[in-house]
């Protein structure tokens, strides 16, 4: 079974730009969660989608948004990029809910200059 | 603020020894507990999960859960240099009415010395 895939793997943007990251979950998984990982803050929860609905959201500003499509693929968008948004963005999928086992994709490394 | 606490390490153990990694959590309503291994530059990889009090063994790994003490641990027997990585404890915690999120500790860096 193919794992979680994320595209692109690397991105370099400048302040003020916006970016869209994509995630394809494991086949059959319906829950997709997004995380931001930085050396100082560790892994922080952004949001979770299930059946095209945002089911849960972490403590991030409204510049961070996402969506899920009918095939469970998900995208996240960050608008008006700031230097502090430089991080590894990880997507994880689980069968039905976050209390099931979550499996991570390889991540997208975003650098904001 | 729900929290998951881990010693940041580094924890150094000789090859062949038992490595013991610990984690405490704040939400008494948490139902599921996970250990992830993350190599430098890679994404987290799920190695163990546990839902009930007691021990759960899988090969060289044993997860231990004590809900009364809000404590979960991971034992790695016969540690190998390839086990050198950062180990992340994750706990599903309530974030609102009927909703949960996975909260991660900041990880313990393990170094296995040949």
Image (cartoon, rainbow, N blue to C red):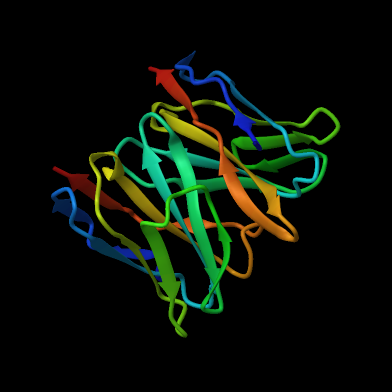
Number of callouts: 0
Q: Is residue B87 left or right of residue A112?
A: right
What percent of the width, then of the height, locates residue B93?
A: 68, 47
Quarter of the image for the C terminus of chain A: give it: top left
What percent of the width, then of the height, locates residue A73?
A: 41, 75
Most extreme residue toward the right, as rendered? B68
Most extreme residue toward the bottom, as rendered? A70
In the image, B84 versus A92, the foreground residue is A92
Q: Which residue appears at 47% of the width and 85% of the height?
A: A70
Quarter of the image for the N terminus of chain A: give it: bottom left
Visible residue check, residue A7:
no
In the image, B49 versus A75, the foreground residue is A75
Identify the image quadrant of residue B28. Answer: top right
Q: Is residue A19 left or right of residue B102?
A: left
Q: Which residue appears at 67% of the width and 36% of the height?
A: B62
Q: Which residue appears at 51% of the width and 78% of the height?
A: A52
What percent of the width, then of the height, locates residue B99?
A: 69, 59
Identify the image quadrant of residue B76. Answer: top right
Compared to B46, does B88 lie above or below? Answer: above
What percent of the width, then of the height, locates residue B22?
A: 63, 25
Q: Which residue appears at 42% of the width and 21% of the height?
A: B111
Compared to A70, does B17 lie above or below? Answer: above
Q: Is residue A75 left or right of residue B97?
A: left
Visible residue check, residue B35:
yes
In the image, B20 versus A67, the foreground residue is A67
């Amino acid at each position: 079974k193919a794992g979680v895939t994320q595209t692109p793997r690397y991105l370099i943007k400048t302040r003020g730009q916006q970016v869209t990251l994509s995630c394809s979950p494991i086949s059959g998984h319906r829950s997709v969660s997004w995380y931001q990982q930085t050396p100082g803050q560790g892994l922080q929860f952004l949001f979770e989608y299930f059946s095209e609905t945002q089911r849960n959201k972490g403590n991030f500003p409204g510049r961070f948004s996402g969506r899920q499509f009918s095939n469970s693929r998900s995208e996240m968008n960050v608008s008006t990029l700031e230097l502090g948004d430089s991080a590894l963005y990880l997507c994880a999928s689980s069968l039905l809910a976050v209390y099931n086992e979550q499996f991570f994709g390889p991540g997208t490394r975003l650098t904001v200059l | 603020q729900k929290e998951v606490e881990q010693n940041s390490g580094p924890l150094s153990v000789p090859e062949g020894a038992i490595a013991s990694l610990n984690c405490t959590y704040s939400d008494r309503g948490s139902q599921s507990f996970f250990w992830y291994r993350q190599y430098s530059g890679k994404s987290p990889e799920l190695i163990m999960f546990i839902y009930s009090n007691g021990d759960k063994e899988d090969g060289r790994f044993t997860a231990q859960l004590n809900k009364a003490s809000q404590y979960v641990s991971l034992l790695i027997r016969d540690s190998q240099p390839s086990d050198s990585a950062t180990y992340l404890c994750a706990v599903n915690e309530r974030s609102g009415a009927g909703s949960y999120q996975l909260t991660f500790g900041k990880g313990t860096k393990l170094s296995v010395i040949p």
